Image (cartoon, grey):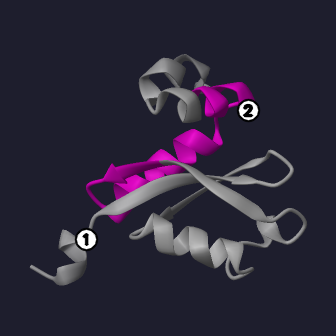
Amino acid sequence: MSVSADKTWFVYLVRAANGALYCGISDDPQRRFAQHQCGKGARFFFSSPAVALVYSESCSSKGDALRRERAIKRLGKGAKEALVATGSLMHVLDELPSR
């Protein structure tokens, strides 16, 4: 089994200075947040810098993290704020658009 297969992946939310929430995945959310703060990585933070890592959730694989990221990105602003406040996606599943 390869080392990357054993790696834990995370989906995370970072708050920007303007209050917006950015969702991403990483194998090290703290390191990735530091990169966002230094201006490396997502263009999302060019106009409003990253100020806080407000949520992270471990996933069993990169694929699971990508699926969770996609689900979170489909949530409305209120549902994302509820996720940050409660730390649980269970409270906001009703907000997911059906496909």
* Residue 92 position by quadrant: top right
Is residue 34 placed above or below 52 in the rendered structure? below
* Residue 49 position by quadrant: bottom right
Which residue lies at the image location 54% right of the left edge and 40% below the top edge? Answer: 71
Lateral position of residue 11 relative to residue 44, left or right: left
Q: Residue furthest left?
A: 1
Which residue lies at the image location 79% right of the left edge and 72% below the top edge? Answer: 43
Which residue lies at the image location 61% right of the left edge and 21% below the top edge? Answer: 95
Lateral position of residue 41 relative to residue 61, left or right: right
Is residue 12 placed above or below 94 in the rendered structure? below
Q: Residue furthest front?
A: 51
Q: Residue furthest right?
A: 47
Question: Which SS class for mark 1?
Answer: loop
Give the label on residue 48, or none: none
* Residue 17 position by quadrant: bottom right
**Pointer 1 local density, CA inside 10 Å: few below 14, some 14–19, many at least 20:** some
Q: Which residue is mark 2?
A: 77
Question: Which SS class for mark 2?
Answer: helix
Query: Which badge, 2 or 1, comes first in the chain's sequence?
Result: 1
Which region of the structure is painted magenta? 56-82
Q: Is residue 80 magenta?
A: yes
Q: Amino acid at mark 2?
A: Lys
Give the label on residue 7, or none: 1
